[in-house]
Amino acid sequence: MKNHSILYLLLLFISSLMVVASCSPLAPVSAPNHPTASRPVIMGFSAWPGWFPWEVAREKGLFEAQGVNIDLKWFDGYLDSINAMAAGRLDANTQTLNDTISSVAAGADQVIVLVNDNSTGNDKIIVRQGINTISDLKGKKIAAEQGTVDHFLLLLGLQQAGLTQKDIEFIPLETGAAAAAFVAGRVDAVGVFAPFTTTALKRSGSKELFSSRDFPGAIPDHLVVSRKLIESNPQAVQGLVNTWFDTLTYMGENRAESYKIMAQRAGVTPEEYQQYDAGTTIFTLEDNLKAFSSHNDMTSLDYAAQKISSFLRESGLISQQPDLSKLFESRFVKAYAPNRK
């Protein structure tokens, strides 16, 4: 970590106890005791069940309650948000671990400060009628957004069956366009994430072949910030992390309203949105603390990053192994930890 001075954040405790959406009791931290910075933090997010809670935070003023001057930007295309973050047009973004590793390998200086969730089924490879095994994908046209999470999932599945991308006809398309191409019958299979899974499954006879549920821990989703933001405004980074836990508390106490807000952002009905619950495991404070600790399985971010980095290199998605030693910063989650009860 580069040498720099840190302005320590003074946290006030809220006297009443609140309950996190996962039923894990926490006492959220109140707004930082400092004036809101004049320049807003520009943060991107896009369509994913683990990131839609940020829309709840915006709608209910939870960023402001933590003293964060936020410019929350919605991206219709996930890859557009990745590119904006890599180009320095964002201070923070919602990204998967594998996509963040790819950005770091390409020279970006990005830091993971929070785990939002693990994908446990909401990333899917969906196939047309007549395809029943991964081996059946050989020679088929398969669409996915190149270099992003569902391309990664596709390669994991192919590897399991002893295949590589050379054994298929890969069609690189933005996720929404990929789902539309599959429904129109222009490709045989598609890699998509929720809510685009709902669109893809509208094709008659289509079905899920495999999903992120089959590869536990392979697709964690995060809040990623620039190192520049950490160095220049650590209070804002702490405020973003605090806002996440405040949002989980709010959602736990206001489930129906939260579903309505998130479903509207996703472009689906609240009933459809609830179907995504099992496919995304939202991370509580305890889940975050475990993820940031070191142990030899995919529940540890350090371990998962090494495994994923090696796979990305072997699969040709990155050209060189990145330096992962500065990728994770746990101090903001740990600063919140004393407030749990």
Image (tube, rainbow, N blue to C red):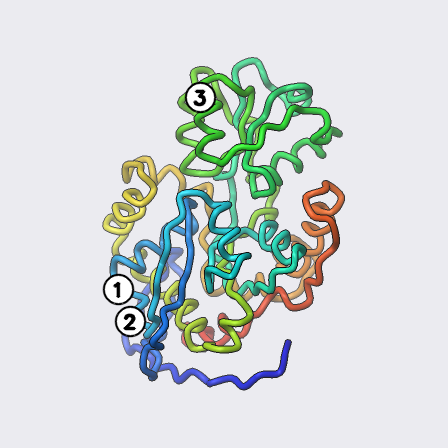
- Mark 3 surroundings within 10 Å by alpha-carbon count, few (fewer than 14), some (14 through 19), many (20 or more): many
Q: Earlier in the sequence, mark 1 or mark 3?
A: 1
Residue 27 visible, this angle: no
- Mark 2 surroundings within 10 Å by alpha-carbon count, few (fewer than 14), some (14 through 19), many (20 or more): some
Q: Earlier in the sequence, mark 2 or mark 3?
A: 2
Q: Nearer the viewer, residue 135 or 84?
A: 84
Residue 268 visible, this angle: yes
In this picture, residue 90 sits left or right of residue 293: left
Q: Nearer the viewer, residue 297 or 73?
A: 73
In this picture, residue 63 sits left or right of residue 51: left
Q: Nearer the viewer, residue 138 or 144?
A: 144
Instruction: Report, in whole angstroms, how far the alpha carbon at label 1 lies from the one at label 3.
Output: 38 Å
State which quarter of the image contains the C terminus: bottom left
In this picture, residue 182 sits left or right of residue 261: right
Q: Pinpoint residue 25: horizontal percent, then vertical percent.
A: 38, 65
Q: Secondary structure at mark 2?
A: helix
Looking at the image, the residue that sits furthest to the top is 130
Which three-letter amino acid code belongs to the residue tagged 1? Gly
**Which residue matches tag 1?**
61
**Which residue matches tag 3?**
183
Instruction: Report, in whole angstroms, how far the alpha carbon at label 1 lies from the one at label 2.
Output: 6 Å
Q: Secondary structure at mark 3?
A: helix
**Which residue matches tag 2?**
65
Q: Secondary structure at mark 1?
A: loop
Instruction: Report, in whole angstroms, how far the alpha carbon at label 2 lies from the one at label 3.
Output: 43 Å
Which three-letter amino acid code belongs to the residue tagged 2? Ala
Q: Residue at x 70, y 52 (%)?
A: 309
Discs 1, 2 touching: Cβ within 8 Å = yes
